[in-house]
Every structure is written in structure tokens, then in C-alpha cells.
Amino acid sequence: MTGPNQQAERVQIVDVAPRDGLQADPADLSTAQKVELIQRLVAAGHTRVEAASFVSPKAVPKMADGEAVMAGVPRTAGVSYSALVLNQRGVERAIEAGADEVCGVVVATETFSQANQRASVAESIQRWRAISETARAAGIRTSVTVSAVCGCPYEGRVDADRVLGIVAELAETQPDEVALADTIGVGVPTQVAALFEGAAQQAPGIVLRGHFHNTRNTALANIAAAIDTGVRVFDSSLGGVGGCPFAPRATGNVATEEVVYMVHEMGFDTGLDLDALIEASAWLEDQLGHGVPSLVAKAGGFPQPR
Ligand code: COA
Ligand code: ZN
């Protein structure tokens, strides 16, 4: 907790709105709108943004302009842009486009893995090994997300030991970070705490990151549970936009402004300006042409005395 002379402990937030947020939204933002979104995120204090994905444009048409987005982002000192990649072609495109970090994905279940990246879990771990070597050789950061860790849209419940086995295999590649993702927003705090405690044992010394969707309104509770286990890095998306084109009925990521509100009130520092985020969230609604799920965007931050 913060006292007068104590520095608040940091929670770091990666805004994934430009990628996870936009890839499944019904709206088609132009490259210029995506770049402006990223500018607004950086202006609000973000130092990590998931800016693009370099995947097949046939599989995810909305991310086809990754190169152009990366060419337009503000190159502010201390700001790092990550890009999602799933194969060798993707990592090469990401390096060429000037990504600071590549983020790979390994899905925890076979059916979803096939639907998402047309590969078995073992094959996608192999692909990640190659991606990671290429990225490391190019001197950029590597992170890998284990997806569907709390439940799968096709297979239902997911065995925690299966998830932890994948974490252990990925830890061998010594990524800068391993993320656990509740891709379809089914997880609950007890489950999330157990997964992160297990992951910390399987990946000693590797930073863990949480990625939660708010599909069943459990995302903030899950973040609080993960914080209790020591996790200090989370993905979220401005406004709570998002989804997954390959996960039926998946909805948005937890909203950045909701996470920021909660962790600030808990006494953590994020380096983010909540008012600027709320303003950016209203701007994003206008661009998308539809409302965003965030409640903090509607309610505002903590009321000031009047
Ligand atoms: N960038 C651009 N194009 C790519 C690509 C990349 N990284 N990887 C593959 N492609 C193209 C190929 O050129 C090929 O195009 P063609 O049909 O015109 O010849 C086509 O995609 C299929 O390529 P292939 O190597 O056979 O891959 P695949 O069919 O086994 O598909 C993935 C595997 C992973 C490339 C593809 O399923 C994909 O990109 N999925 C997107 C998943 C995603 O983004 N999910 C959401 C986030 S987790
Ligand atoms: Zn996601």
C-alpha cells in the first residue's frame, strides 16, 4: 500500500485493443484510425501496446495492414510495440516492420488449436520454438500466450495439468514473458489463482502475464486473484472491445479503464492517466460506430468532492 514516502508498486498494462480488440469487431477501422488509436493509448501513458498481428490476411482480414500500422506508430522512447505472430513468415514480417516484441500463441486444446492456427498443440509449440529463435536472433523481445487456459469453446473444461505442461515446455524457450489467457471468459478467481501458482513453479524466473476476457463478468475478479499470487502484468483493451474470430461467442477483453480504476484504488501505480483513457474510449466508440462494454467509461473515475 502507499504511504506518504512510499512509492506505489507497479502494475503494468499492455493495451491489446489495436489487435485483439479490433480483429473481431464488426467495424473496419482504416490504418489511419488504428494509428490514431495507438497514438491516443501512448498519450494516455501506455508503454506497451499490441499493435498488430502478422498472420494470414485471408484468415484475419482486419489485420492485413499490419506493416502500414507499424510504419505509422509514434516511436516514443520507452514505448514498446508487440505483434502477434504464429509462424516463420509472421515473425519475419514483424521484424521487418519494426516490432519491439513478438507474441506467439499456443492453444491449450487440440480442437481450438486446429481452428485457430491449423496446427496441433505440439506443432504450434514447435512453431513457437522457431519463432522465438528468429526473434531472439533479431534482438527483439519474445512472449508467448497459452490460450483457452480456463475453458475451450469446443472442448469445454480444460485440465490445469495440461496447461501447466504446456507452460513448462514453453519455459524451455526462455521467453521474456508467458501469458495465460482466458480467451472465452469462463474462468473464476480460485481457478485463476491455482493456474498462476502452478505456472510460477513451471516457469521459474519468467514474468507471467494475465489476459482475461470479460464474457461472463469475471475478468476483474480474476485479475484481483492473479495479483494476489504476485502477477503484475496484464493485457486489457481500451473500452473492453474484442473477441476472437475463431472462438464462437467470445466477447471483449477486460476494459483497460476498468483495470486501471481498480488497481489504482488498490494502491498500485500504472503510469496511466484514467481520464485520458476514458476520453480515448469515447473516441473509440465514435470510430467503431457502436458502444463499448466498459462501465468505467460510462461512470467515470472516482468522484471528486464538489
Ligand atoms: N503472413 C501473411 N500470409 C500468410 C502468413 C503470414 N504470417 N502465414 C500464412 N500466410 C498465407 C500463405 O501465404 C497462404 O496464402 P495462399 O493461400 O494465398 O497461398 C495461406 O496464408 C495459408 O498458408 P499456410 O502456410 O498453408 O498456413 P495454414 O493454412 O496452415 O494457416 C496460419 C496457418 C496460422 C498461417 C493461419 O491459420 C493464420 O494466419 N491464422 C490466423 C489465426 C489468428 O490470427 N488468430 C487470432 C489470434 S490468436
Ligand atoms: Zn484475447
Image (cartoon, helix red, strand yellow):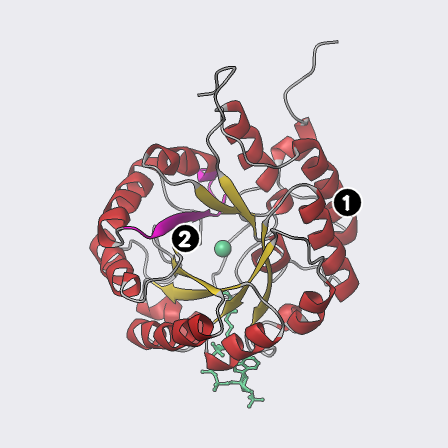
Is disc 1 surrounded by few (<14), some (14 to 19) or many (20+) residues within 10 Å? Answer: some
For the C terminus, the image quarter is: top right
Compared to residue 256, the image places residue 183 above or below, namely below
- The quarter holding residue 118 reads bottom left
Residue type highlighted by circle 2: Ala
Residue 155 position (above or below residue 303) = below
Query: What is the secondary structure assignment of the residue under circle 2?
Result: strand
x 57%, y 77%: residue? 93
Q: Position of residue 119 (x, y in %)?
A: 37, 77
Nearer to me, 215 or 233: 233
Q: Mark 2: is the Cβ under 8 angstroms from ligand 2?
A: yes
Q: Which residues are magenta?
A: 205-219
Instruction: Examine the rendering and report whether any part of residue 243 can be seen.
Output: yes
**Secondary structure beneath disc 1?**
helix
> Circle 2 sits on which residue?
181
Give whichever of discs 2 and 1 has the lower sequence position: 2
Question: For residue 304: magenta?
Answer: no
Could you give the CA–CA distance between mark 2 and mark 1, rounded to whole angstroms? Answer: 27 Å
Q: Amino acid at mark 1?
A: Trp
